[in-house]
Image: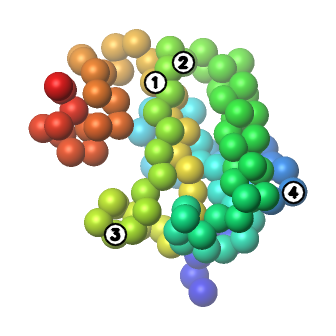
Amino acid sequence: MDCPFCAMENIILQNDLAFAIFDKYPVTNGHMLIIPKRHFANFFDVTDEEKQALFNLLDNCKDYLDSRYQPGGYNIGINVGEAAGQTVWHLHVHLIPRYKGDIDNPRGGVRGVIPEKRIY
């Protein structure tokens, strides 16, 4: 198996079941990935214990980014399946800091995955 997340070295934060890294191809400054230590692709296959660990670590990452970068907001996203844009077949949660002025009109947020549906 050739998984880029199964042999991570640049871990920023972690707990027993998950770890966080900076995204190799960040959307914004501070873009992080929260990743379960167990290898599986689909968010809907996460155990309750792993889900709690992921969300606890998400909170820790938010605090870390708040203190380091002071963003004005966040987008949180999970790509599940090829049709949704998943390209790495190990579950990961994107925590994307957002900054005032990073785009002209941020209205619609994650709805922007289909650009013509973002502004409503």
Using the numbered discs, state the Cα–Cα distance from disc 2 to disc 4 in whole angstroms: 27 Å
Q: Label 1, on which residue?
A: 98
Helix, strand or loop status at disc 2: loop
Q: Position of residue 4 (x, y in %)?
A: 59, 69
Dot placed on the residue nearer the N-terminal end, 4 or 1: 4
Helix, strand or loop status at disc 3: helix
Q: Which mark is residue 16?
A: 4
Q: Indicate whether 13 appears above or below 69.
A: below
Q: Are marks 4 and 1 in contact (CB under 8 Å)?
A: no
State how many labels appear: 4
Query: Who is closer to the viewer here, 93 or 64?
Result: 93
Using the numbered discs, state the Cα–Cα distance from disc 1 to disc 3 in whole angstroms: 25 Å
Regarding residue 19, the answer to whether it shows in the image is no
Judged by depth in the image, the label closer to the viewer, 1 or 3, is 3
Judged by depth in the image, the label closer to the viewer, 2 or 3, is 3
Q: Residues within 10 Å of mark 4 (few under 14, many from 20)?
A: few
Mark 3 belongs to which amino acid? Answer: Glu
Query: What is the quadrant of residue 43 in the picture?
Result: bottom right
Query: Who is closer to the viewer here, 44 or 8?
Result: 44
Q: Are marks 1 and 2 in contact (CB under 8 Å)?
A: yes
Mark 2 belongs to which amino acid? Answer: Pro
Mark 1 belongs to which amino acid? Answer: Arg
> Looking at the image, which residue is at 64% across and 50% down?
34
Q: Indicate whether 39 appears above or below 31.
A: below
Q: Label 3, on which residue?
A: 82
Q: Which mark is residue 71?
A: 2
Using the numbered discs, state the Cα–Cα distance from disc 2 to disc 3 in whole angstroms: 30 Å
> Looking at the image, which residue is at 71% across and 64% down?
47
Q: Describe the colour scheme in one phrase.
A: rainbow
Q: Position of residue 48 (x, y in %)?
A: 73, 59
Dot placed on the residue nearer the N-terminal end, 2 or 4: 4
Query: What is the quadrant of residue 13 in the picture?
Result: top right
